[in-house]
Amino acid sequence: MVFFDAHCHLQDERLVPEWPGVLARARRAGVLGIAVKGARESDWSRVAALAEREKGLHPSFGLHPWFLGERSGDWVAALEARLVAFPEAGVGEIGLDPEPKGGGGVPMEEQEEVFKAQLALAVGLDRAVSIHVRGAWGRLLALLDEVDFPERWMVHCFGGSVEVARVLLARGAYLSFSGTVTRVNNRRAVAVLPAVPVERLLVETDAPDLLPRGAVGPLNEPANVVRVVERVAAIRGESVGELAEQTDQNARRFFGVT
């Protein structure tokens, strides 16, 4: 079986010393596609280095809402330059989060300005977008009517309701599910997953965080996307092999890679 991790952060400083082992374990597990998402300007160079040295690693560059306070004055030009240098790169991880990690967060108005600017780059360059949303579903739904979204956009680690999922799917979104689906008390995933058309379904690890239940820690890694596929298949009543193949195809279509 072949798997595709549609969202992770291999560039995270916690994983950098582990790259050889992490990549070897991913290959042994059949994870031949890995989408590596930048989150701040300071990690874009590591994302680029990974994409240049390893086949099957697909880069995205973006500013995550937790790290907007770090951005430079010319961040838009810097992001565009990265995207031009990597013609298949996506935009992400971008998003909206009213309670950014570590406190002292950027106000939502400012978050929305940065979010819109990154969406505009994605639309202009026809790039796939990976979106983080926590506690801001209402604003995301409103923005769908206020600004243009690219043809390819995903909500990573989806944790919204069935109702929100249906609206997003109707507007063209892909929904990606992480190791949180393996939690015993995740009733929302059990309710939402059967409502997602299989051709719009993605799976991810969000490594090095969100370690699936039963996986060896402390850090998560792309090889563990196999556990996510197994749990998603069980919830949906589908075979692991068929779901692995379908989500691999979905991710390759979404990111525009072979």
Image (tube, rainbow, N blue to C red):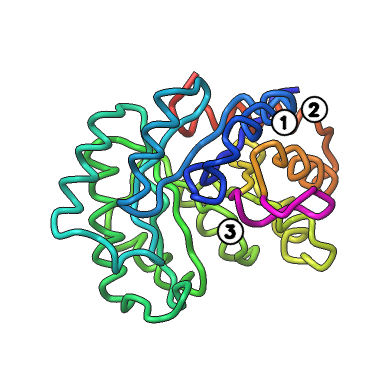
Helix, strand or loop status at disc 3? helix
Tag 2: Cα neighbours inside 10 Å, few (<14), some, or many (≥20)? some
Query: What residue sits 14% from the left and 54% below the top?
Result: 74
Do the CB atoms of the residues marked 2 and 3 lie less than 8 Å apart?
no
Front residue of this view, candidates 232 and 110: 110
Q: Earlier in the sequence, mark 3 or mark 1?
A: 3
CA gap between label 1 and label 2 equals 5 Å
Q: Which mark is residue 241?
A: 2
Please state, as top left, top right, bottom left or bottom right, where the N terminus lies in the image. top right
Q: Residue 167: x, y in percent? A: 52, 59
Of discs 2 and 3, which sits in the foreground?
2
- Magenta stretch, main secondary structure class: loop
Q: Which mark is residue 244?
A: 1
| Residue wearing tag 3 | 165
140 in the magenta segment = no
- The magenta stretch spans which residues? 206-219
Residue 135 against residue 213 in the figure, above or below: below
Query: What residue sits 20% from the left and 45% below the top?
Result: 78
Do the CB atoms of the residues marked 1 and 2 lie less than 8 Å apart?
yes
Q: Residue 218: x, y in percent? A: 71, 54
CA gap between label 2 and label 3 equals 25 Å
The three-letter code of the residue at mark 3 reads Ala
The three-letter code of the residue at mark 1 reads Ala
Q: Earlier in the sequence, mark 2 or mark 3?
A: 3
